[in-house]
């Protein structure tokens, strides 16, 4: 069974922008074969500004192949049903800041899945924040 991501964008910022709807099937690198592995859907509560590995590539139960297709989804879901728009989590891979996820923000992005390229997150404050996340990848 295929894993399919769909995004719908609508905005009134610009006149004439009719919106965008895109769908993507998650595929193995350079093929039309579907990605069949996942880390599973998880949640993690953070309550300090300390950077932590959200996904440690070398520690996955079934280690992904290096330099192959993988996708990661992360969402800042706030804490106890409260979404704090002022509290963000910085997402970093291999010491490169990818961006900030403020309360309610999410990302879906490709990864190269190299052992040293862990997905690291660091909250902006000591206020509790919960992230939900999963990774889809090719099996070794």
Image (tube, rainbow, N blue to C red):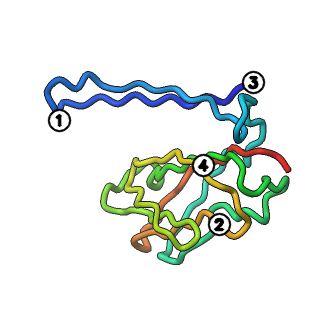
Q: Earlier in the sequence, mark 4 or mark 1?
A: 1
The part of the image, by quadrant, that contains residue 3 is top right
Question: Which residue position is annotated with label 1?
Answer: 13
69 vs 19, nearest the viewer? 69
Q: Earlier in the sequence, mark 1 or mark 3?
A: 3
Q: Earlier in the sequence, mark 4 or mark 2?
A: 4
Query: Which residue is found at the position 46% from the left and 53% from the top?
Result: 76
Q: Earlier in the sequence, mark 1 or mark 2?
A: 1
Q: Secondary structure at mark 3?
A: loop
Q: Secondary structure at mark 2?
A: loop
Query: Which residue is found at the position 73% from the left and 31% from the top?
Result: 34
Q: Position of residue 123 (x, y in %)?
A: 46, 68
Q: Residue furthest left?
A: 15
Q: Secondary structure at mark 4?
A: strand
Question: Which residue position is annotated with label 4?
Answer: 72
Q: Position of residue 38 (x, y in %)?
A: 74, 44
The part of the image, by quadrant, that contains residue 84 is bottom left
Measured in 3D between alpha carbons, the distance from the residue under mark 1 to the one under mark 3, in whole angstroms, is 38 Å
Disc 4, disc 1: CB below 8 Å? no
Task: Reply above or below: 134 against 14.
Answer: below
Measured in 3D between alpha carbons, the distance from the residue under mark 3 to the one under mark 2, in whole angstroms, is 28 Å
Q: Earlier in the sequence, mark 4 or mark 3?
A: 3
Query: Which residue is found at the position 69% from the left and 43% from the top?
Result: 136
Question: Which residue position is annotated with label 3?
Answer: 1
Q: Which is in the foreground here, disc 4 or disc 2?
A: 2
Q: Earlier in the sequence, mark 3 or mark 2?
A: 3
Q: Residue furthest bottom?
A: 50
């Amino acid at each position: 069974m295929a894993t399919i991501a769909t995004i719908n964008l609508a905005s009134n910022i610009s006149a004439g922008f009719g919106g965008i709807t895109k769908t993507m099937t998650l595929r193995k690198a350079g093929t039309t074969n579907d990605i069949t592995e996942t880390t599973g859907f998880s949640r993690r509560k953070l309550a300090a500004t300390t950077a932590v590995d959200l996904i440690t590539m070398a520690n996955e139960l079934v280690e992904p192949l290096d330099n192959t297709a993988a996708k990661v989804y992360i969402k800042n879901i706030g804490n106890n049903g409260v979404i704090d728009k002022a509290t963000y989590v910085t997402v970093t891979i291999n010491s490169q800041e990818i961006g900030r996820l403020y309360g309610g923000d999410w990302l879906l992005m490709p990864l190269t899945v190299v052992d040293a390229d862990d997905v690291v997150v660091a909250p902006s404050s000591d206020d509790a924040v919960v992230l939900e996340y999963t990774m889809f990848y090719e099996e070794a």
